[in-house]
């Protein structure tokens, strides 16, 4: 039996006008229509529905007269009459007024019959981009579709790759005013129930007006991140990456209005993976992976090591006597490094705020002309510019932007410690950062797994891209119900 949300259409109009205002918001449509001889009230947000499909569905029902039908329909027959004459596949029944209003605001079409029986029609058509290749996760060969800002489109892209009824998409409304749609995606027969329970609990604890920054706001609420510089989740704009993680036992969060999907739980080594490794042969993919780990390590330590050797020439072997500033400058070497480091950050920030056609030209001007002039006037030593540029290239090799930015903060900390205490400061700062990384356990998962705690087989798979036909177990940290793959 359908739910009687209002006592009558007139009561429904008064309620809706009190909520939306009468003739105030141009995009709120409240229209009196008919389904054959039954009066109905149609309520929708014009920018969120598929108007063409709505017109196709309703037009045949009220463009003709039906002399052989009675115009008065008893209340006990009204719901059945509507079901018989408007048998739309995407029809649901709200339980109360609040659910009816929320459905309309989410893009569904609300229908109220003469005696207040309520229905919601699934005719959502959110504005947004069509799937296109993500800028941050490009591959030479592979699919060119990527997530957009439409949650229904994003879930469909995942469903297209995993055609299994065990794939779940639980829809939740998060925040009090924003009521953002968040879909929890997982494989029912694989996912760890404890991780799922933890996520449900954290979502219920979110009491806030709205997730204005969508997925990033949600991450901070879930993990209560505070001032930790490191990301505790992985973001991806590629459906194939998300599908692969779901099959491993991870959980994905699809947030409406965001083109990125959150993957959890993850370790730091997940943040260093890239799809291109799996689009090449195992040997080539392993080489790429080694180069990326090499880049990540030296983006953290290259400048501090060079400063340490340049200021302590007694540690230099005979074959490395070229290291160090050959030209004297009035500005201390460590200050040159800091200025160059800040200059690169300003350049990166300016590139974000500069229109794309101009950003390339701006980079050339800043990187070549300004850098050369700074050397000519004696502000920088050529070696400082060289090693700062090499470090920047290494940092760009890290596939996760959030991790790349965090590494820069750690590098700055090591440099300051090296300046203050020499070799002792360098090694102590490395130990502090390593201890900090080992202490992190988001979702009770060790952030440095499988290095700490050490799992030899899993650690080998971190560095070596084994053939896909190799019978690999699902990662231990996800706690999958079935560790052996089908």
Image (cartoon, grey):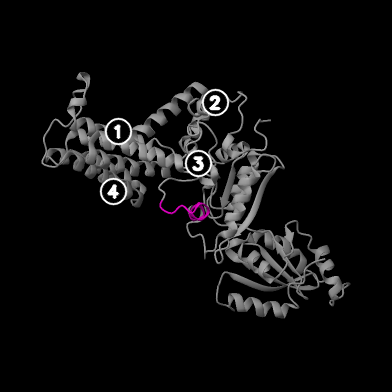
The residue that label 4 is drawn on is: 346
Q: Which range of residues does the magenta coloring cover?
A: 217-227
For image coordinates 61% across by 29% down, the residue present is 473
**Left or right of 383, for residue 167:** right
Q: In the rendering, at what x and y percent does residue 89 appear?
A: 75, 56
Q: CA distance from mark 4 to mark 2?
A: 42 Å
* Marks 4,2: beta carbons within 8 A: no
Residue 427: horizontal and vertical position, in percent? Answer: 31, 34
Query: What's the CA distance linking mark 3 and mark 1?
Result: 33 Å
The answer to whether residue 308 is left or right of residue 442 is: left
Q: Between label 4 and label 3, give the one nearer the viewer.
A: 4
Picture coordinates of residue 202, whole percent (x, y)? 57, 55
Residue 432 appears in which quarter of the rendering?
top left
> Which of the marked residues, 3 or 2, is nearer the chain's N terminus?
3
* Of marks 3 and 2, the one in the foreground: 2
| Badge 3 density bin: few <14, some 14–19, many ≥20, Cα 10 Å | some
Residue annotated with mark 3? 133
Considering the whole magenta stretch, tell me its main secondary structure: helix
The residue that label 1 is drawn on is: 302
In what element is the residue under mark 3? loop
Rate crowding at label 2 as few (under 14), some (14 to 19) or many (20 or more) other CA atoms within 10 Å. Answer: few
Q: Residue at x 55, y 38 (%)?
A: 241
Element assignment for label 1: helix
Residue closer to the observer: 216 or 133: 216
């Amino acid at each position: 039996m359908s739910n009687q949300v209002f006592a009558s259409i007139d009561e429904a109009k008064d309620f809706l006008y009190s909520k939306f205002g009468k003739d105030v918001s141009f995009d709120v449509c409240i229209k009196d229509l008919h389904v054959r001889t039954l009066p109905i009230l149609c309520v929708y947000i014009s920018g969120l529905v598929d108007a063409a499909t709505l017109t196709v569905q309703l037009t045949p029902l009220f463009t003709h007269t039906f002399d052989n039908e009675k115009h008065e329909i008893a209340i006990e027959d009204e719901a059945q009459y509507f079901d018989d004459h408007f048998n739309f596949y995407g029809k649901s029944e709200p339980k109360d007024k609040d659910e009816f209003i929320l459905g309309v605001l989410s893009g569904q079409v609300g229908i109220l019959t003469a005696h207040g029986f309520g229905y919601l029609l699934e005719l959502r058509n959110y504005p947004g981009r069509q799937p296109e290749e993500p800028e941050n996760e490009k591959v030479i060969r592979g699919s060119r579709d990527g997530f957009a800002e439409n949650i229904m489109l994003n879930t469909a892209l995942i469903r297209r790759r995993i055609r299994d009824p065990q794939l779940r998409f639980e829809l939740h409304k998060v925040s009090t005013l924003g009521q953002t749609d968040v879909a929890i995606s997982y494989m029912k027969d694989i996912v760890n129930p404890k991780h799922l329970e933890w996520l449900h609990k954290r979502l219920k604890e979110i009491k806030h007006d709205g997730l204005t920054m969508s997925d990033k706001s949600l991450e901070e609420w879930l993990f209560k991140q505070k001032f930790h510089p490191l990301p505790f989740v992985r973001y991806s704009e590629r459906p194939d990456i998300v599908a692969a993680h779901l099959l491993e036992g991870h959980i994905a969060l699809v947030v409406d209005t965001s083109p990125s999907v959150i993957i959890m739980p993850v370790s730091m080594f997940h943040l260093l993976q890239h799809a291109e490794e799996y689009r090449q042969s195992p040997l080539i993919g392993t080489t790429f992976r080694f180069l990326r780990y090499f880049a990540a390590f030296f983006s953290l330590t290259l400048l501090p090591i060079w400063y340490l050797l340049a200021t302590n020439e007694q540690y230099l072997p005979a074959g490395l006597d070229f290291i160090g500033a050959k030209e004297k400058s009035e500005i201390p070497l460590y200050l040159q490094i800091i200025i160059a480091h800040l200059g690169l950050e300003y350049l990166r920030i300016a590139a974000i705020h500069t229109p794309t056609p101009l950003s390339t030209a701006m980079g050339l001007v800043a990187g070549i002309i300004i850098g050369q002039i700074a050397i000519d006037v004696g502000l920088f030593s050529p070696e400082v510019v060289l090693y700062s540029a090499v470090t920047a290239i290494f940092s760009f090799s890290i596939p996760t932007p959030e991790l790349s930015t965090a590494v820069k903060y750690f590098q700055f900390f090591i440099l300051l410690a090296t300046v203050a205490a020499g070799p002792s400061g360098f090694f102590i700062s490395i130990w502090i950062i390593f201890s900090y990384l080992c202490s992190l356990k988001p979702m009770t998962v060790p952030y440095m797994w499988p290095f700490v705690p050490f799992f030899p087989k899993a650690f080998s798979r971190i560095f070596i891209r084994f053939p896909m036909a190799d019978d690999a177990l699902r990662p231990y940290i996800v706690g999958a119900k079935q560790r052996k793959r089908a």
